[in-house]
Image (cartoon, helix red, strand yellow):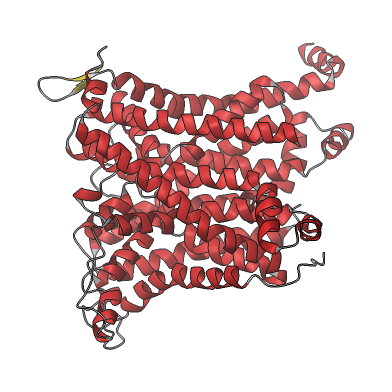
Amino acid sequence: MARRVERKPVVAVGVTIVFFAWLYLPILAVALFSLNDKKSLSSFSGFSLRWYDDLVHNEALLDSLVASLQVAAAATLGSLVLGTMLALGLERIRGRRGNLIGAVTLLPLVTPEIVTGVAALLLFTGIGLKLSLTTVVLAEITFSIAYVTVIVRGRLAGIALEVEEAARDLGCTPFQAVRLVILPMLLPALLGAGLLVFALVFDDFVLAFFTTGVDPQPLPVRVYSSIRFGVSPAINAIGTLMLLASALLIVAALVLPRLLGRGTSSLDLITGGRR
Amino acid sequence: MAAPTAEATRRTAPRSAQRTRLWALLLALPTAWMMTFFVSSMVIVVLLSFGRTTNDGFPAFALRTDNYEALWNDVYLELFLRSLGYALATVAISLLIAYPVAYVIALHGGRYKNALIAAIVVPFFASYLIRMYAWKALLSDDGLVNSALRNLGLSDGITFLNTSYAVVGGLVYGFVVFMILPIYASLERLDTSLIEAGKDLYHGPVRTFFFVTVPATRAGLYGGILLVFLPALGDFVSAQLLGGAGTFMVGNLVQQQFMEGQNWPLGSALTVGMMTALTVLMVAYLRATSTQAREL
């Protein structure tokens, strides 16, 4: 659609350019100084991979990395299953009960993470669960279900009810209609939601901070405790890797669903959908 | 004989009823999950906020209002007001940044629109912690900004960290995307002929902007304000990493009560206080948007 807006708003364009510089400058500085061969964070004296080499030999950090990957994978799987069930149920059950359940599942999205984290900590200690990676996974699933539900519901809304009716007319039981017809159509949305949740959980600090046990701690929790004591090139190195990993995951979450099918992608969730 | 009977009843049962049963079955597990892990955990926070700490230092349920009374003193009040001030400043600055950026991308982005939005989204969804750390590294006394200032002979170095500016700056950096996206979405949907008409009627881009464009994107504005305010008020990472004891927010106090001070009942009361403030805001938001829906 051709837009007929005459002049470029100069001030707004200026703000936008400055914004992008402001957005990327700190991140690029971290990446640049992770490759510095001296400990300085302000003068770049030479290219070196020594901080990355240190990382590879840091057992505790590697344990944390593995722990974070496990937590993210388990939470992604769990929230995909629960979130999809919820989306299917909510999309077809209308009325007051559906609205109430829908609202409750969206609550974690608008609750500050610190509140969710504190509440989860109280619940787990209250019922006598020892804090560990398992409790982190439970908390992260609870938090991530909403993302999956929103994305899958967005896609479901685009699938005509007639498709399901047709499957039923051809002899499918309701369950078969979902399994053989609806789920395959949801695949791009599930892929996008899965990648998004994996990235969010992998990077998540606040929930993990409140619900983790002592050893091994998820990567962001460990990184946080070293950041508190100051800035160092080693943190630059691990930070750069974390930024790269999540950037790749998010890009995949945005792009892959579009490649797989004309469905909605996670970007539509974020921007409120295409019209 | 049982199987055919079952088959027969299934055939005769109305299709919608069968479907409803399946959907209800699908809903059961996630609903139970949310009740167990989310709703009940919130209930525990509320209950414990009326609790007490036993003599050997363990939290216990009780029915007393001591924790809330303890909140009513100058130190905590100042902390609450400071958090509120920081969160409001964060919303205001985010608004000033987000509107022009969203406007330029939505109305002048052309075929680069999606790429530009992705360029904003990708770094924002990457580790919040690392992005806060990036600012800490940049602004620290021997960081890039200060060394640049020194090299240019402009100053002997400025202490950025441990100031309110650093904390609010961190919050804006952390959450401005939640302002950009809803405003962008509503600008995307905006019928540009409205702007044309406004220009015909009001003669001037500035008046058109404030009397046509801004009101037409109210939904996005309200959404953005809410989405920035909520996490900003509850944040503790920015104040922890970029600030100091003088810039602590409610989140820092909550974190201390739970992870360091070990006064969980007091921490719960603080959390409930924070949630109450946020709920009031949520309700205001919902009322504002539903009034708007009625007007349309």
A263, above or below A86, in the image:
below
- Depth check, front residue: B143 or A170: B143
| Count of labels in the image | 0
The x, y position of residue A203, in whole percent, is: 41, 54
Q: Is residue A169 above or below residue B166?
A: above
> Is there any visible trace of residue B130 in the rendered image?
yes
Q: Nearer the viewer, residue B209 or A102?
A: B209
| Residue at 21% in and 74% down | B157
Q: Is residue A208 above or below residue A31?
A: above
Which of the two residues, A1 or A76, is positioned nearer the viewer here?
A1
- Compared to A248, does B31 lie above or below? above
Residue situated in front as seen by the camera: B31 or A226: A226
Residue drawn at x 59%, y 47% as measured from the top left: B221
Residue at the spot 64% in from the left edge and 20% down from the top edge: A97
Q: Percent from the top left, x then y, of residue A239?
A: 35, 65
The picture quadrant where one finds residue B13 is top right
Residue A207 pos. (x, y %): 37, 43
